[in-house]
């Protein structure tokens, strides 16, 4: 048994209890060691269902939020996914564990470098770059799914335009302090939206985000 295996199993049961049903997501989260992605200061809290500080005034998202957003994307192996807001790298690692080809963008270079080291150590299929993710990453578009892990003032057209037909988008939209989760599906060239209330993310800062 590895360190924190019991805690990780317990977290998966907590996520089931909160309504996560997608076994693909639960299996991936049971395999990604969240304690590798948190600040060593908080290692004993790594499997609590809470967000935690990761430096640069940013956070690793709450496991329930990671599970909920990932489930909303309805992913399969080999799908191409763009993540905006690499942060600790945990969400990207969960996507890669599902078997997706992951592209991720982070605006804080220190966070990006830290996440890259973890990705390399785990041999995960993730391509990460520094920069403003609100403009997307046209070079690898179109994507089967786009996940934005910071709160935006609205849904950027730049990201919608990089989705495949049938592709899915999950993005928190609202004020700087609280947001709704917008889950979109590209249907006949138009993004059909579903709204889920009650999310709280750090702000998405960039050309098509907050100033
Ligand atoms: N997905 C992350 C994880 O698993 O740890 C959580 C990320 S944290 C809630 C949001 C991240 O989005 C922060 O690291 C922040 O620096 C980043 N961010 C904010 N605006 C951004 C932008 N325009 N482009 C790229 N990253 C951005």
Image (cartoon, rainbow, N blue to C red):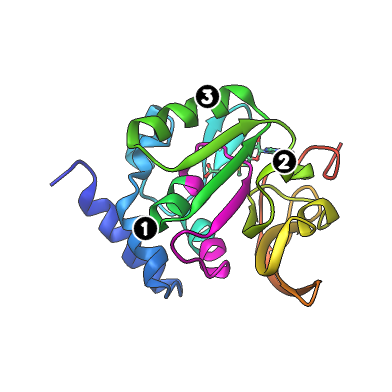
Horizontal side of 184 relative to 37 (left or right) equals right
Number of other residues with Cα within 10 Å of mark 3, as a class: few under 14, some 14 to 19, many 20 or more? some
Number of other residues with Cα within 10 Å of mark 1, as a class: few under 14, some 14 to 19, many 20 or more? some
Write down the residue under mark 2: 133
Secondary element type, mark 3: helix
Nearest the viewer among 177 and 86 is 86
The mark found on residue 135 in the picture is none
Residue at x-position 43% and y-position 26%: 117
Residue 65 shown in magenta:
no
The mark found on residue 28 in the picture is 1
Residue at x-position 82% and y-position 51%: 158
Q: Which residues are magenta?
A: 68-92
Secondary element type, mark 1: helix
In three-dimensional space, the C-alpha distance between marks 2 and 1, rounded to whole angstroms, equals 25 Å
Q: Locate ligand 1 by image quadrant.
A: top right
The mark found on residue 113 in the picture is 3
In three-dimensional space, the C-alpha distance between marks 3 and 2, rounded to whole angstroms, equals 16 Å
Horizontal side of 24 relative to 89 (left or right) equals left
Q: Is residue 112 above or below residue 194?
A: above
Q: Position of residue 116 (x, y in %)?
A: 48, 29
Can you tell which quarter of the image residue 181 is in? bottom right
Disc 2 under 8 Å from ligand 1? The reply is yes
Q: Position of residue 23 (x, y in %)?
A: 37, 71
The tag earlier along the polypeptide, 2 or 1, is: 1
Secondary element type, mark 2: helix
Residue at x-position 51% and y-position 56%: 66
Residue at x-position 52% and y-position 62%: 70
Q: Is residue 90 visible?
A: yes
Horizontal side of 153 relative to 197 (left or right) equals right
């Amino acid at each position: 048994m590895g360190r924190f295996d019991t805690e990780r199993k317990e977290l998966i049961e907590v996520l089931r209890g909160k309504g996560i049903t997608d076994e693909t997501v639960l299996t991936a989260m049971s395999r990604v060691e969240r304690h590798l992605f948190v600040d060593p200061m908080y290692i004993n809290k790594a499997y609590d269902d809470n967000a935690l500080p990761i430096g640069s005034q940013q956070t690793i998202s709450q496991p329930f939020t990671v599970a909920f957003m990932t489930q909303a994307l309805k992913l399969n192996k080999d799908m191409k996914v763009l993540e905006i807001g690499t942060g600790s790298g945990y969400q990207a690692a969960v996507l890669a564990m599902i078997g997706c080809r992951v592209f991720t963008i982070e605006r804080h270079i220190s966070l990006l470098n830290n996440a890259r080291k973890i990705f390399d150590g785990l041999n995960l299929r993730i391509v990460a770059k520094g920069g403003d993710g609100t403009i997307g990453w046209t070079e690898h578009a179109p994507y089967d799914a786009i996940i934005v892990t910071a709160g935006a003032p609205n849904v950027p057209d730049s990201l919608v335009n990089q989705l495949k037909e049938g592709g899915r988008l999950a993005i928190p939209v609202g004020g700087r302090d609280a947001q709704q989760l917008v889950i979109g599906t590209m249907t006949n060239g138009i993004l059909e939206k579903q709204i889920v209330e009650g999310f709280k993310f750090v702000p998405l800062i960039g050309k098509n985000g907050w100033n």
